[in-house]
Amino acid sequence: MKRIRVVQWGLGAMGAGMAKLMAEKEGLQIVGAIAKRKEKVGKDLGEVLGLGKKLGVNVTDNPKSILKKGEVDVVVHAVASTTKESFEELKLIMEAGINVVTIAEEMAMPEANEPELAKKIDELAKQHRVAIVGTGINPGFILDAQIVMLSAVCHRVDRIEAARINDLSPYGPTVMKSQGVGTTPEQFEKGVKSGEIQGHFGFPESIKMVAEAIGLKYDRIEQIRKPIVSKVARETPHVKVQPGMVAGCEHIGIAYCGDKQVIKLVHPQQIHPHLEGIETGDYINIFGVPEVHMSNKPEIPGGVATISLAVNVIPLIVNATPGLKRMVDLPIPSALMGPTAYERRK
Amino acid sequence: MKRIRVVQWGLGAMGAGMAKLMAEKEGLQIVGAIAKRKEKVGKDLGEVLGLGKKLGVNVTDNPKSILKKGEVDVVVHAVASTTKESFEELKLIMEAGINVVTIAEEMAMPEANEPELAKKIDELAKQHRVAIVGTGINPGFILDAQIVMLSAVCHRVDRIEAARINDLSPYGPTVMKSQGVGTTPEQFEKGVKSGEIQGHFGFPESIKMVAEAIGLKYDRIEQIRKPIVSKVARETPHVKVQPGMVAGCEHIGIAYCGDKQVIKLVHPQQIHPHLEGIETGDYINIFGVPEVHMSNKPEIPGGVATISLAVNVIPLIVNATPGLKRMVDLPIPSALMGPTAYERRK
């Protein structure tokens, strides 16, 4: 089996996880790694990842030195969340004739927030005969691609309601801040207004992906961010929440067609939801003919799943036709456990 | 939007359902229908389907008269269960340069039971530059393609257990017989031995599809058919089951690698399972990193879903590269509710 040559761009928590997973996969060969932090640059990737062995690949901060035509099949990009922040890097990769998998949330469906950049990316990809896709657990999978998949059993889809109820406890201070964990309800409202408390990143992307794939019409999206006010004391290493304070953010995205709710996505993110008897999980409800009521408990863990998805789509994007792809444009993705998982994609 | 020109081959319960659904879809144009039964042949399809309006298409029993190159984009084939029974008809369609969707169960993964015919079909499809796929709820979706889809969130898959617990009550006498409903336990054992009681049709296909897509190895499949002996009286218009008699067949398919169970699929099919407190549903459990535990209650209704899937994959197969495809080789399928559902597939 000819191995797929991969460069990992970005070695934060996500990027490092991807590199570790790729190092385990027999069908993938890591041929380069790009990072900014000085303490990583120049070192062997295996050392940086704490694998206890060398991988024979030095981490570089000079992308151009390793992104050479014909030497790399795909770059896995884990650097930023928006299309705008990622654009120049994605362009550089595509111009080198290399395919791209990125976990930039907006890139799951860049047409949602950056239609002009999305068009440019599609043109660049076609010009250089490469394929590019944004993936991740959400957006990219559980509240979009998986909904689309289940809709295939339907004669008719009238409306969709889906929810992802997860536990933020494992996350660090940045996530606590962006979700308003540990604020008072008043601080929460102010934070939402100022944009400091963002809630979930990806509803417009997920909604557009689902609506286009199924062919549902909507004319506007409303987003609501509500504080989850705790009745009990909750605590993580990074934050303390007293009763009456905010344990997280319930973010709701609704696509309307006129007065009708077409797609409603609900994503309450909080620390220790079980302390108030809340079961975490992923829930998809399709109303139509027939109805579909899927649940997945506990929720698919976000970090692990995003890392998996970024790695597992590699054979799909390498074998795709040129252009900007969304998860629903690619064949059904799978875990990569042996040669046939790579070979079947040709 | 240019409509996709479809011929429906087979107008039994499934085929008629597909034709009805296609007649509702704005992106599809029914240009022909093929049936054997004399009472249908020569009549307008709308009349045969009981739509209360004409569709301008007469049902024919002469396939060659309507399967003409350049006049039909795809045939939806609902005639038989095995690859062998279907082969000559599929060949005829492909030789006319027309794509195929079939609900023949074995065709979901014809390599499982008919590797030589599968090879021939792939060669024929490539020679005539058409694509062909087998689909349906099971095999084709819930115990294979959907399992593969969920595996994409996994770093590693160790083993898979999935079950479909459904209610046979709506079905007619043929299904009751093939599942042994209404027999005594002794008659059931005899029926299994003679092959009269078949249980589910599709485990080798589903197992091979999942294993190849994920790259899991197995060296043998064991199939077990157990009687579901009823503790209570159960009854449908077609069959009466007294306590102590058989209400259905619990069919289990297990793929082993050495002594290790790699994939276990369980499909207990019976009438009125709720009479013994059994909840119907679809269940997928992936053991690995992370674990995934999906459930879908009640079960996705088989007939409706098979009809939907056959129709909903039409844009995917029309736009696919030539060859024999399985559901996991095509883009994530979706319901077809408006123009973008067709356009996005190009």
Image: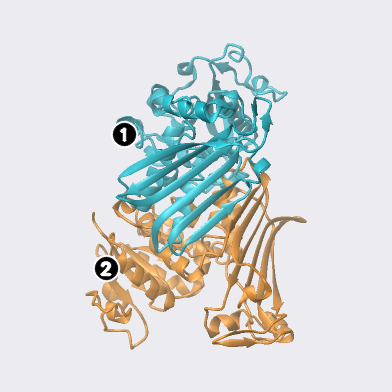
Chain colours: A orange, B cyan
Say which of A164 and B222 sits in front: B222
Chain designation of label 2: A
Q: Is residue B78 visible?
A: no
Q: Quadrant of the N terminus of chain A?
A: bottom left
The residue wearing badge 1 is B115
- Residue visible at 68% across and 82% down? A246
Hey, what amino acid is under mark 2? Lys
Front of the two marks 1 and 2: 1
Hey, what amino acid is under mark 1? Pro
Say which of A212 and B109 sits in front: B109
- Image position, residue B189 (x, y; %): 47, 29
The secondary element bearing badge 1 is classed as helix
For the residues tagged 1 and 2, is the chain the same?
Answer: no
Question: Relative to A82, is B147 above or below?
Answer: above
The secondary element bearing badge 2 is classed as loop
The residue wearing badge 2 is A68
Q: Residues within 10 Å of mark 2 (few under 14, many from 20)?
A: some
Chain designation of label 1: B
- Image position, residue A61 (x, y; %): 32, 81
Q: Locate residue B127 relative to residue B225 in the image: left or right.
A: left
Q: Give the quarter of the image for residue A6.
A: bottom left
Q: Give the quarter of the image for residue B180.
A: top right
Find the residue positioned furthest to the left. A56
